[in-house]
Image: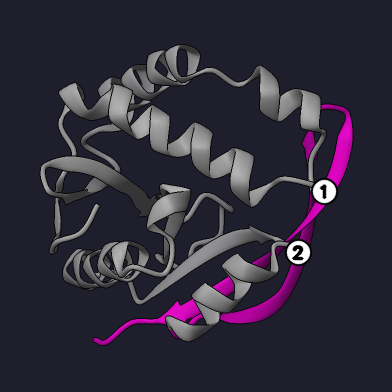
Amino acid sequence: MSGAVRVRDMVEADCEAVAEVRVRGWRFAYDGLIPAWYLRAMTVEADAATRRQHFARDGALHTHLVAERAGTVVGWACHGPNRDGSATGDGELYALYARPDQLSTGVGRALMDETVARATAEGYPALRLWVVRDNVRARRFYERAGFVPDGAEEPWHVAGVTVPEVRYVRRLAA
């Protein structure tokens, strides 16, 4: 699939396509980092139901974006207020996924550029994110996008396994 990447606001009708991006993205990104049985058990149908619930509940508080190429959803990003409870007023990039066959084609960059532009326009002084410590590909992507680790690390418990995550931050233009 080739052509220009178009980023737009997600609508509820995108939930199934976003779920497909997420499930394929998880299986690719977390292969060898979280239990294989957990990744195999993920389904687009179950994730789409979760996406619909999140979208309906959090739609006004969070910004959901999709990336399309040739009319097909090939990526998804979501950001909103920082969840760590601090009073910094920072935003948080909760998720950014591209279909594995779309990696290194500009999908992630287009989503990141629009996320940063929106978070800046929304008045966040910085954007934070958490990434699996051993997800080297994702860490390189975020570093190329101007994020730096700030020293925070937390355990993420998934499928009975503890997976360390590190926090990154990027200051935004005033």
- Residue 84 image point, x, y percent: 58, 53
Task: For the C terminus, give its image quadrant.
Answer: bottom left
The residue type indicated by label 2 comes to Arg
Camera sees residue 26: yes
User: How many angstroms separate mark 2 from mark 1 (CA)?
Assistant: 8 Å
- Residue 34 image point, x, y percent: 79, 40
Judge whether 172 appears above or below 64 on screen: below
The residue type indicated by label 1 comes to Val
- At 42% from the left and 81% from the top, the residue drawn is 145
Closer-to-camera residue (138/152): 138
- At 22% from the left and 66% from the top, the residue drawn is 114
Q: Which residues are magenta?
A: 146-174
Residue 163: give its label.
1
Mark 2 vs 1: CB contact within 8 A: yes
- Residue 172 image point, x, y percent: 33, 82
Badge 1 local density, few (<14 within 10 Å), some, or many (20+)?
some
- Residue 59 image point, x, y percent: 24, 33
Q: Is 167 in the magenta?
A: yes
- At 16% from the left and 69% from the top, the residue drawn is 121
| Pointer 2 or 1: first along the chain | 2
Judge whether 148 appears above or below 11 on screen: below
Dot 2 corresponds to which residue? 133
- At 79% from the left and 48% from the top, the residue drawn is 33
